[in-house]
Amino acid sequence: MSTPFEWLRVDNMKNEALQPRGMRAPMASAYCGMGRSKFLDLVAKGIAPKPKKPSVGVTIWDRRDLDEWLDSLEGRK
């Protein structure tokens, strides 16, 4: 049985039609094609974009920041 908010489940985020702009660490790292620990390591080193903190206990990465960063990597070897 589905609920009106079934589409909000993380499992359903794989659907191309709904991709949130703000992502928590597990989703942001998967979006970038790497593991969570490697992603957070790159963030800590200032290589990957820093997250935004809209409220206490909420840390998200903006899809646009991630796209810009990934695009900048194209020329690297």
Image: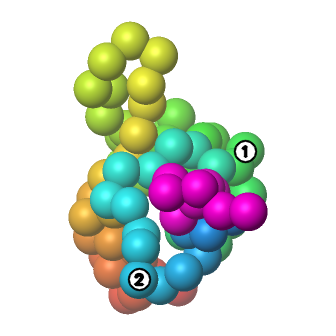
Q: Could one spot residue 47 in this view of the protein?
A: no
Q: Is residue 49 left or right of residue 35?
A: left
Q: Dot 2: what SS?
A: loop
Residues 64 and 68: in front is 64
Q: Compared with residue 52, is residue 55 higher up or lower down, i.e. above or below? A: above
Are the residues at dot 1 and dot 2 in contact (C-beta closer than 8 Å)? no
Span of residues in magenta? 1-10
Residue at image x 33%, y 80%? 71
Figure label count: 2
Q: Could one spot residue 58 in this view of the protein?
A: yes
- Quadrant assignment for the N terminus: bottom right
Q: Dot 1: what SS?
A: helix
Specify the label residue 37 is tagged with: 1
Crowding near the residue tagged with mark 2, few <14, some 14–19, many ≥20 C-alpha atoms within 10 Å: few
Crowding near the residue tagged with mark 1, few <14, some 14–19, many ≥20 C-alpha atoms within 10 Å: few
Residue 54 is a magenta residue: no
Indicate the quadrant where residue 21 lies: bottom left
Image coordinates for residue 27, horizontal then vertical, percent: 58, 56
The residue where tag 2 is placed is 17
Indicate the quadrant where residue 37 lies: top right
Residues 59 and 38: in front is 59
Image coordinates for residue 31, horizontal then vertical, percent: 54, 68
Residue at image x 27%, y 26%? 54
What amino acid type should be assigned to the residue bearing mark 1? Ser
Dot 1 or dot 2: first in sequence order is 2
What amino acid type should be assigned to the residue bearing mark 2? Ala
Q: Is residue 75 left or right of residue 64?
A: right
User: How far is the residue under mark 1 from the one under mark 2?
Assistant: 28 Å
Residue at image x 36%, y 50%? 22
